Image: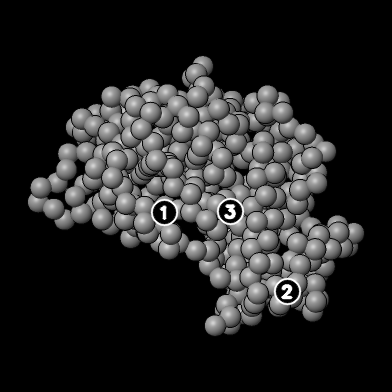
Amino acid sequence: MSLRKRPDPLFVLAGGPGQAATAFYPQAATALARIHRDRDIILVDQRGTGRSNGLYCHFKDQLSGESTDDLVAAARQCLQELSTHADVAFYTTTLAVGDLERVRAALGYRRIDLYGVSYGTRVAQEYMRRYPQRVRAAVLDGVVPPQVALGARLPLNAQAALDRIFSRCTRDPACHARFGDSAATWRALAESLAKRPVTVSLQSPTTGEPMTLAFTAAHLATVLRLSSYTSEQAALLPLLLHEASARGDFTPLAAQYLIVSRTYGDAIADGMQSTVVCTEDVPFYERAGIDPARLERTFLGMRQIDALEHVCAVWPHGPMDPEFHAPLHSNVPVLLLSGGDDPVTPPAYAEEAARGLTHHLIVDLPGMGHGQLTAPCVGRLMAQFIERGSTAGVDLSCVRKVHAFPFFTSFAGPSP
């Protein structure tokens, strides 16, 4: 640690919505180590997450095939559980941004730096809008532009990312020779599973207990979506699909479903997420121009959007600033990070957000997924940017060395 610490700390804003900053930080600590040498790093569990009255109900996975009636019943049960210690309407981004400002003032910092990932980029931009004089510099990683109703285009964005992953396999000699056309394999599997689920007996990869799972097309969609979040997980997809298609072995796919659904599901405060999504996103889906026929041609289809709309019909909506979805115009220096294969917040979102930012720098990492903090060279880039407090002179040469994780051609790993 430096004895001459800089006066502006870095506030870390986690994603989700629903992830706690204190839970996110362990995976981010190494990438932020350079910044931490000279600056305080502040972790605030946003209201409704972590130790800030976390609103955890553990909703059922909305893509795993439950009926609409089951989802609505689960939402009502969650509300009943949370009502003993929370009014869930008061957990929106608008209110959380006010909390952040009160924390800054209480700690005595005149100006702060921001790092936000995914939903955290929405929080960062809203804070910049309301308290522009308090922000020295901001890093937006996996950018959600204020004007975007998140989720409305998820099926299209996720399909585009999956197509790029499979296209990359086709262009890779070892991957193509081993697996052929992975896109065709996925389509055939999805069609077969839609007609008849496959019963899989396996040991739980998280508990070791024996279990049986009726593996459906919805489970396959969950594997495709969540495995696309990282380059490392995406590198397994052609192999997992091939094992199921060519050998009839669905155990690896089922195990991957259990791993990714638990990894992402356990990190999220379901009640807080529902309040944010039902207040700030779902009511604006109509304006987003959803084309059901087009979305149904994707691997996600309309299932998640339909589920969210039904849950939000019974979930309370909270306060939101009138200008919440207006484009942000700011003079604050901003570094925007995007993954070329991001299934949630594609590079086009960073470009959209950047239109109102006078001083910005966009870094697009080819082959990467959602959230770039742990990607090679990003920690160095962020440290340069935060130290300078400016986009000028940031050395991007290391970006040329960033490549997607090589595809697994067997469970022993990628080809030599």
Residue receiving disc 3: 341
State the quadrant of the C terminus.
bottom right
- Front residue (pair 2, 347): 347
Q: Position of residue 402 (x, y in %)?
A: 45, 61
**Is 406 rendered above or below residue 91?**
below
Q: Which residue is mark 2?
A: 179
Q: Amino acid at mark 3?
A: Asp
Q: Quadrant of the N terminus?
A: bottom left
Classify 353 as above or below 117.
above
Q: CA distance from mark 3 to mark 2?
A: 20 Å
Instruction: Please give the name of the residue rendered at 69% of the width and 67% of the height, measured from the top-left corner.
Output: 170
Residue 350 visible in the displayed image: yes
Is residue 251 among the parts visible in the rendering?
Answer: no
User: In the image, which disc is placed on residue 373?
Assistant: 1
Measured as percent of width and height from the top left, residue 37 is found at 20, 54
Q: Secondary structure at mark 2?
A: helix
